Amino acid sequence: MADISAKMVKELREKTGAGMMDCKKALQETEGNIEKASEWLRKKGISSAEKKAGRVAAEGLVGQYIHIGGRIGVLVEVNCQTDFVARNEAFKALVQNIAMQIAASKVEYVKISDIPAAIADKEKEMEMGRDDLSGKPEAIKEKIVQGRIEKRLKEMCLLDQAYVKDQNITIEELVAQHVASLGENIQVRRFVRFELGEGIEKEETDFAAEVAAQMGIAPAGDSKATEAAEAVEAEVKNEKKKDGKKGKK
């Protein structure tokens, strides 16, 4: 791999307007070739996205997606700069694809900066207490935990997810590509995802316990209760058999 200097990154950044980390990655991907790195950024839509990111995006669409069977529903707001682009078929398709992406993955936030500090701190606290880290030097422990936290936070964010229709790019890169092709700043502002029955404690019927309660013979889990339940089930089956024989006669 080519040695990527700070001077090369600076030159590419000034030429394309892309972020430093994106420039460094582009140079690594192209063995330090400035022209090829610039082209790599354009293909990804990153350079255009960086330049337009500061523009106000107050137009756009609120898209929806209801999964087959009506068990999952999504509403998402995606913004652009003009009503003209909002009516563009490519933009409409982008909004729809993002809504479908949210339905397919249990993400909670748009980007990492949206995650409350309290949640990030809680994740760190949990990771620091893992058994596999006990006995390790504090500096190494911190480094391992930091890597795990970054991974966990990305799992919670929409823009960091691999696009379901093309696993080679993220949703952030998908949006950047549309910024490049449509010529406007595009931002995923917010979303809400509904899953049928989510958060409801579902009542589980324990037939043995129910029989025990009705007969007043033992608490749930007792062998006598189980035997009683099995006896009732056998009796019900016998009655069904008798009824079936009567019907045949």
Image: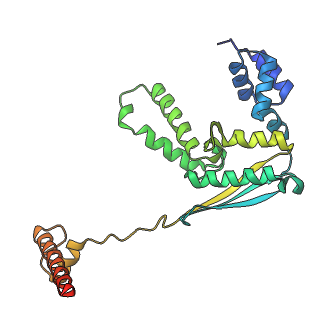
Inspect this view and state whether residue 58 appears: no
Can residue 57 be seen in the rendering of this structure? yes
Instruction: State the quadrant of the C terminus.
Output: bottom left
**Who is closer to the viewer here, 56 or 228?**
228
In the picture, residue 180 is in which quadrant? Answer: top right
What is the quadrant of residue 19 in the picture?
A: top right
Q: Quadrant of the N terminus?
A: top right
Residue 74 placement, left or right of 217: right
- Residue at point 79%, 51% (across, down): 91
Residue at (39, 32) in percent of width and height: 133
* Camera-nearest residue between 25 and 63: 63
From the viewer's perspective, is residue 100 above or below residue 136?
Answer: below
Residue 175 drawn at (x, y percent): 74, 43
Up-down relation of residue 246 to residue 96 (above or below):
below
Q: Is residue 222 left or right of residue 141?
A: left
Which residue shows up at 81% across the image and 42% down it?
Answer: 179
Q: Is residue 16 above or below residue 31?
A: below
**Residue 56 on image: x %, y %:** 85, 50
Q: Position of residue 98 (x, y in %)?
A: 67, 51
